Image: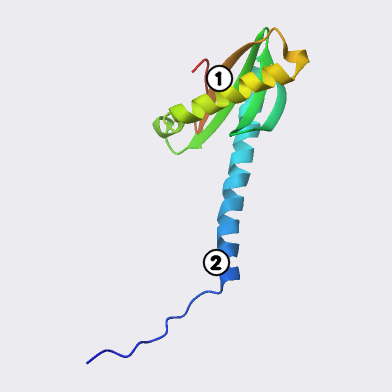
Amino acid sequence: MKRPRVARPRLPRAAKAGWRQAAGGAAFRDGHGAEWIAAAWLMLKGYRILGFRLKAPGAEIDILAKKASVLAVVEVKQRRTIEAAESALSPDQRERLRLAGERLLRQRPGLKGFRLRLDTVTLVSGKLPRHRRGL
């Protein structure tokens, strides 16, 4: 004999979407805050910030900065441990960021003559930011 089917309470779609948006909004705010901390750190090291969250086909450049003749495409990673933060950038993502940086160099005549470099700034709670140059 089959058991009678009991209707389970379900959240309406709008409630589910609201939860996802709230979680996504918190991640967005945390990421945005991490980018500002990374930018301040780079400025203390003598970099000039040229832009934030620059959109390019297939990639988004978190921070574009320059120092002397170097144009740095900076990816910001915030994680619980330094190991997790440093391993969060995949080879595919590196390639997309490099291509986005090269496209930027071609499209903006004011950046002609700069040498492109891919950097990361990793942030871990309770520690100073870590800037790694030339990945």
Q: Nearer the viewer, residue 4 or 34?
A: 4
Q: Residue furthest left?
A: 1
Task: Kindly state the secondary structure of the residue where label 1 is placed.
Answer: strand
- Residue drawn at x 56%, y 22% is 98
Left/right placement of residue 116 relative to residue 125 reads: right
Placement of the N terminus among the 4 image quadrants: bottom left
Along the line of sight, which residue is nearer the eye, 113 or 21? 113
Instruction: Identify the residue under disc 2.
Output: 16
Q: Which residue is mark 1?
A: 118
Q: Is residue 124 above or below residue 117?
A: below
Residue toward you, 10 or 86: 10
| Of pointers 1 and 2, the one earlier in the residue sequence | 2
Neighbour class for label 2 at 10 Å: few (<14), some, many (≥20)? few
| Identity, as a three-letter code, of the amino acid under mark 1 | Leu
CA gap, disc 1 to disc 2?
A: 38 Å
Label 1: how many Cα within 10 Å (few below 14, some 14–19, many 20+): some
Instruction: Give the image location of residue 54, x and y in percent.
Output: 68, 31
Is label 2 in a helix, a strand or a loop? helix
- Locate residue 6, reporting x and y percent: 38, 87
Q: Is residue 129 visible?
A: no
- Compared to residue 24, the image places residue 50 above or below, namely above
For residue 105, which numbered disc appears in the image? none
Q: Amino acid at mark 2?
A: Lys
Residue 123: x and y in percent read: 52, 32
Say which quarter of the image contains residue 17. Answer: bottom right
Quadrant of the rendered image containing residue 52: top right
Instruction: Look at the picture and state if 7 lies above or below 10.
Output: below
Q: Is residue 30 visible?
A: yes
Residue at the spot 63% in from the left edge and 45% down from the top edge: 29
